[in-house]
Image (cartoon, rainbow, N blue to C red):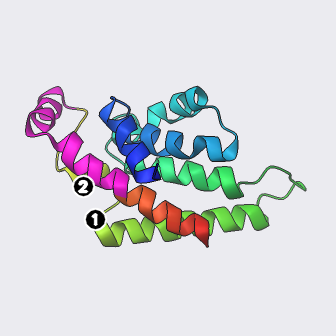
Amino acid sequence: MKKTELAAQYHQRGYGCAQAVLASFAPDYGLEETLALRIATGFGSGMGRMCQVCGALTGAFMVIGLKHGKVLTDGKPYGPNTETTYRLVAELAEKFKQRNGSIICRELIGYDLNDPQQRAHVVELGLFKTLCGKCIQDAVELLEETLAE
């Protein structure tokens, strides 16, 4: 099954954007599904409903960390793994922004998800399914391109 389809299934089952992306790639990096779902929970709705960086994109950033992240240290704050991770995260964010106009949840969805009335309106309009679904698909597609580099 394609990662875009798997991520869409997670989202349709009620998982958030970050969860859908991270859980779709977790087994490839030895991360247990339940742990991936727990880790990514707080990143949904632009990180804890703060409507900041899109949850789908932050899920993708976590996957980049799973592949390239720094594990060993020589006591210095940076190094090749950190530099690679930061570069790929920035490049992915830029590609996502080019596709969607922003990486900020509030700008993408057009509502403040921390406000219960606005959040209810988003549900009523079906934006979590349509707009967030597209962001998940875009994040996964761009992530797959990034990981293949």
Instruction: Please give the name of the residue rendered at 11% of the width and 29% of the height, measured from the top-left corner.
Output: 117
Residue hosting label 1 = 100
Q: Position of residue 90 (x, y in %)?
A: 52, 67
Q: Is residue 117 magenta?
A: yes
Q: Which residues are magenta?
A: 115-137
Helix, strand or loop status at disc 2: helix
Instruction: Please give the name of the residue rendered at 60% of the width and 69% of the height, measured from the top-left corner.
Output: 148
Q: Main secondary structure of the magenta part?
A: helix
Among all residues in the image, which is located at the extreme front? Answer: 1
Q: Position of residue 32 (x, y in %)?
A: 64, 32
Q: Which of the numbered marks, if any, corresponds to residue 108?
A: 2
**Residue 57 in sight here:** no
| Amino acid tagged 2 | Leu
| Amino acid tagged 1 | Asn
- Count of residue discs: 2
Would you place residue 17 above or below residue 32 in this image?
below
- The mark nearer the N terminus, 2 or 1, is 1
